[in-house]
Amino acid sequence: MPESGIAHTPPKILAPAGSKDAFLAALAAGADAVYCGLKSFSARMEADNFAMEELGALTRLAHQKNVEVYVTMNTMLKEHELERALSQLEKMARIVNPDAIIFADPAIPALAEAAGFKGELHLSTLANVSFTQGFSEAIEATGANRIVLPRELNVEEIKTAAEAVPKGVDLEVFIHGALCYGVSGRCYWSSYMGGKSGLRGRCVQPCRRVYKQGHKNERFFSCQDLSLDTLVKVLLDIPQVTTWKIEGRKKGPHYVYYTTLAYKMLRDNGKDPKTKKNAQALLELALGRSGTHYNFLPHRPYNPVDVKAQTGSGLMLGRLQGSFKAPWFSPREPLLPGDLLRIGYEDERGHLIRRVKASVPKKGKFHIAPQKERIPPKGTPVFLIDRREKGLKDAIAELAKEAEAFSPKPVTATTARLPKVMRHRPKKAPRATTLYLFREDRHGPKNTEKATWVSEKAVPKTRKGGVGNRWWWLSPVIWPDEEKEYAALVRRLINFGAKHFVLGAPWQMALFPEAKRKGLHLWAGPFCNIANALAAESLKQRGFTGVMASPELSREDFRDLAKASPLPSGVVVAGYYPLTLARTLTPDLNPHDAFASPKGEESWVAKHGENHWLYPNWRVDITDKSAELKKWGYSVFVHMHEPIPKGVKLKKRPGEWNWNIRLL
């Protein structure tokens, strides 16, 4: 029984693994479960990830040691990828047989069933189940056995979530690791700047870069790592929180081993002062960034962005000294043979990687032999990014030998078939509807329909004309403190005769009682990230009457979705689409002024409700593609408008986003 005196089963320590050695390090540390990805459809495509046969052998080794294995398939699926995703699921069910799949796309449950997968389904944090009324809807819609909570929730919100989650459904909570600045599943920054989508596992981390505002050049959006350390004891009293998750599938085995070991100690013997001290020492040596408790304690929240803090990945050991011909640095910690160093920040061009060949004492000298590449300037920070101590190295080697005993199962031909989807075929060509979306009560041009974001300010307090004909848009993220207000506003609008609603997440269907849905037109909005017909079919079964395509798509992706969709389709053709939404903003950034990227791209911040919306200073604009889009079947065309701050200068750019780019 845990020391808190509670009788429920202690939570599992869920460790990350982006490589074979990291997987084995998790086993060596005594993890209860490991999560990892295959070579496709994983939200960490920059990790090494696993081949099917390799993961099959490792999973059998893990199961022999009573360790569970979860496989991530948590990317947004495009229409032409459904066959390949089904094939991967079927092979995985046969060869790997994982305990669970972590997913975000609504198409995955139907694909998993068709593939014959018998394990659990865990709804990823990328699916953004952020408010309590949405829990039951998310479970009913997907059949998930577990929900992975957003990192932004505090412990009181986690407790409220635990009370709201249906019986028999688990919650998974992040306890350690890198923090994304944007809300998971609501960040388009990387995609907007060049087609590498975070929803597709290709994020290039633009939030980690240096931005300029006025005379300041700072990393205004680069978060410290989450580190709940000794605070995790509070989670022991929440039985629905069955899993403590460590982020880090791009990290090495050293990080995986020491974070897993530390949190096992804190879970099993966290009241002992010596144990707490030892666990914290392990976390400090785990090669992560400086840590923050973030929002976990509501009475003592921490802003995760501190421009004075060090947010390069790895343990900072010192700064480069000497000349460019004979550079060196003096390490703050001893260096061991095999240590891997990075000279410079990972997001900056010209950073160097060096392997340590011989021991160097603390405050000694490590000389960096110049090679063909250019040496970074004096003062550049040096980070320890991976370490293989002899004990860990030996443990990994021993487990690797054990894994060899599990010969890989051969990859066999797949026979599963895609679930059928009946394409939406209107009896006659639908009338094109053009929406002009505003924050306030405004009209667009003639022959367009009004659309307004739902807010206390925008929703009338008494019945008035025009409410019923307008399209009302819900926020892409609703936090627990906001859900009562949104539920009341939705009720008020329905009572006033509103018929058209655009939802920011599929689970916002919970705000519309089933008895009230008759006669309503409920559309899945662009923030639902829908890119395939099977996902649209799952929404149709939940009562949606239309679906907006993900705005990240390329020309071919837009075409394929509309031609296969079982629901009427809409598309954002123009306006200001956010780069990202976040629950926090550093006080070092003035939200009323523009800030610029290293390439001179300007953006600004606007706060709506609890969310900070970051916008680029140029519009999405594919209005000249409207005839083509209509030919494919799109019937709703959206223009998104935002109030422009006085200090922001708008820029003329094509604004085609990924239209002509192959979305990675």
Image (cartoon, rainbow, N blue to C red):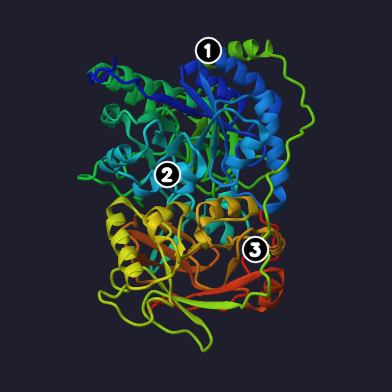
Q: Which residue is mark 1?
A: 65
At a point 71% along the width and 68% down the height, the residue shown is: 632
- Residue type at numbered disc 3: Asn
Distance of label 1 from label 3 (alpha carbons): 46 Å
In the figure, 506 relative to 257: above or below? below
Q: Secondary structure at mark 2?
A: loop
Q: Looking at the image, which is closer to me, 390 or 440?
A: 440
Q: Are marks 2 and 3 in contact (CB under 8 Å)?
A: no
Q: Are marks 1 and 2 in contact (CB under 8 Å)?
A: no
Q: Which residue is mark 2?
A: 179
At a point 28% along the width and 69% down the height, the residue shown is: 456
Q: Are marks 1 and 3 in contact (CB under 8 Å)?
A: no
- Residue type at numbered disc 2: Leu
Q: Secondary structure at mark 1?
A: loop
Residue 499 on image: x %, y %: 43, 70
Q: Residues within 10 Å of mark 1 (few under 14, many from 20)?
A: few
Q: Looking at the image, which is closer to me, 581 or 543?
A: 543
Residue 206 on image: x %, y %: 51, 55
Q: Which residue is mark 3?
A: 658
At a point 67% along the width and 59% down the height, the residue shown is: 561
